[in-house]
Image: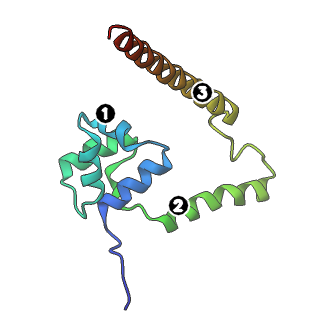
Amino acid sequence: MSVSTKPNHIGRKISRIRELRDMKQEALAQALGTNQQAVSIIENSENVDEEKLAQIAKALGVSVEAIKNFSDESMINYFNTFTDNVVTTGSIFANNCTFNPLDKLVESYEENKKLYERLLEAEKEKISYLEKLLNSK
């Protein structure tokens, strides 16, 4: 039994572009003024109306045509041109990173630390409340 995928599934293309842009569904939803569930529905839809597609393209920072013509194969070819340029030109600047991974790690650590502190505070409040209940009996 062979399973073939439809090459023009717009929702999947939106999803892949969003992932390549390192954007979560929640962020795209916020940019569109909707919720994450609506973005999930769009990404599972084979077709998207032109007006909504234009809004999504703007939020993703690409053109409508880029979404319609997107393919993983073209992305591989696109990125291969960078590595080909490095080999042929000897330039180390053809593939420069747009963010510092260490900054991302520190940012993630700080967010986790804040979350842990909020959870710890909530647990302390629960304990205090339960102790108050026990002492009042």
Residue denoted by label 1: 30
Between marks 3 and 1 in the image, the one whose residue lies nearer the viewer: 3
Q: Does 103 sit above or below residue 36?
A: above
Q: Is 102 on the left-hand or right-hand side of 79?
A: right
x 37%, y 59%: residue: 13
Numbered tag placed on residue 70 in the rendering: none
Residue type pointed to by label 1: Gln
Q: Does 116 sit above or below residue 80?
A: above
Between marks 3 and 2, how big is the CA–CA gap?
29 Å
Residue denoted by label 2: 75
Residue denoted by label 3: 107
> In terms of sequence position, does the residue under pointer 2 or pointer 1 come before the other?
1
Q: Is 118 on the left-hand or right-hand side of 14?
A: right
x 67%, y 33%: residue: 100
Residue type pointed to by label 2: Met
Nearest the camera: 123 or 95? 123
Between marks 3 and 2 in the image, the one whose residue lies nearer the viewer: 3
Answer with the quarter of the image where residue 34 lies. top left
x 36%, y 54%: residue: 14
> In terms of sequence position, does the residue under pointer 3 or pointer 1 come before the other?
1
Answer with the quarter of the image where residue 12 lies. bottom left
